[in-house]
Amino acid sequence: MRAIAVFLLLAIFPLVMQAMDNLFYVSFASRVLIYAIAATSLNLVLGYGGMVSFGHAAFFGGGAFVVGILAVEGLRSAWIAWPIAIAVAALAALVIGALSLRTRGVYFIMITLAFAQMIYYIFVSLKSYGGDDGLQMPGRSTLGFGTLGNDLVWYYVVLSILAAVLYAMHRLVHSRFGRVIAAIRENEARAEAIGFPVYRYQLLCFVIAGGIGGLAGALIANQSSYVSPSLLHWIQSGTLMIMVILGGVGTLWGGVIGAAVLLGLEHLIADYRIAWLAKLAPNYQDHAGFAVGI
C-alpha cells in the first residue's frame, strides 16, 4: 500500500508543477528517477549479492552510448534501440563478470574498476562519435505514440519503467534465486557446501544488474539528448554506490531514496552557490565569464 501511495504522489507531482508553471522540476524529477533505476540495479549486486562492483558505470554509460550511436546512425525507435542497449550492457556484464567473479575482495573491486576504465577509454577514442566532447543526439527516441520530446510524457514513461523495475526486483529478491543470492552473501562457503552453484548464481545476478543498468543508460541519454563520456567514468560508479549507501544497502527502495537525496543535495548546493555569487557580485549575471571562471 505504501508503494502505491508513493507512486500516486509521483504521478500527481508533474501535474502540480505544470499548474505552477514550473516544468524545470519535472525534468529534474525525471533525472532523479533514471538515476534511481541505475542505483537499484547496482543495489542488486552490492546489497543483495554482496559483490562490491566499482565498474557499474560501464553498463550505465555503455547503454547510453549504444542508444546515442544508434540515434546518430538513424535508428531512433525505442522498441529497437533500448533492447539493444540492454543486451549490449548485459553482454558486457557477462564478459566482465565471468572474469571478475573468479576473484574476491579488493581484487574483485579493482578488476571491475579496470574493465570499466578500459570501456571508458574505448568510447573516448571514438572521435567519429564525439570523443572527449561526448555525443549529441538528434533528439529523443520514438515510441510510435505521443512525443517523448514533451517533458510530461517523458516523465511518465520513466516513472512507468521505474515501477516495472522495482516490481521485478521485488519478485526477484523474494524468489528462490533471491534467497540463494542472499545465502551466498551471508556465507558463500556454506552455500557452496550445500550444493548451490555459487559462481553461476553470482554471474546471473551480475548480468541482470548490468542489463538494468544499460536500460538506465538508455534513458539518461534521452534525458538531455546528449551522451557524456563521464557516464562511463569510475566517478559515476562511485556516485551510484553513494546513492545505494545513502538510501539503504540491500533494500528495495534504497536506490530511489539515495538518488533523491544525493541529487537533491546537489541541486540545493548549486542554488546556494548561485545565491552566494549574487551576494559577492550583484551584477554577476552580466559577467558570465566571471561566473564560469569561479
Image (tube, rainbow, N blue to C red):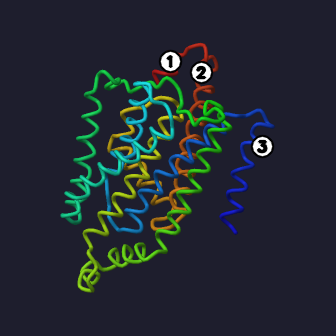
- Taking depth in this image into account, of 149 and 249 the one nearest to the observer is 149
Total residue callouts: 3
Horizontal relation, residue 286 to residue 105: left or right:
right
Q: Residues within 10 Å of mark 1 (few under 14, many from 20)?
A: few
N-terminal of the pair, mark 2 or mark 1, is 2
Disc 3 element: helix
Three-letter code for the amino acid on which mark 1 is drawn? Phe
> Which label is found at residue 281?
2
Horizontal relation, residue 223 to residue 97: left or right:
right
Three-letter code for the amino acid on which mark 2 is drawn? Ala
Three-letter code for the amino acid on which mark 3 is drawn? Val
Disc 2 element: loop
Image quarter of the N terminus: bottom right
Residue 14 horizontal/vertical position (percent) = 72, 42
Q: Residue at x 56, y 50 (%)?
A: 161
Q: Are marks 2 and 1 in contact (CB under 8 Å)?
A: yes
Residue 209 horizontal/vertical position (percent) = 39, 57
- Taking depth in this image into account, of 284 and 61 the one nearest to the observer is 61
N-terminal of the pair, mark 1 or mark 3, is 3
Residue corresponding to mark 3: 16
Residue corresponding to mark 1: 290
Q: Residue at x 35, y 68 (%)?
A: 50
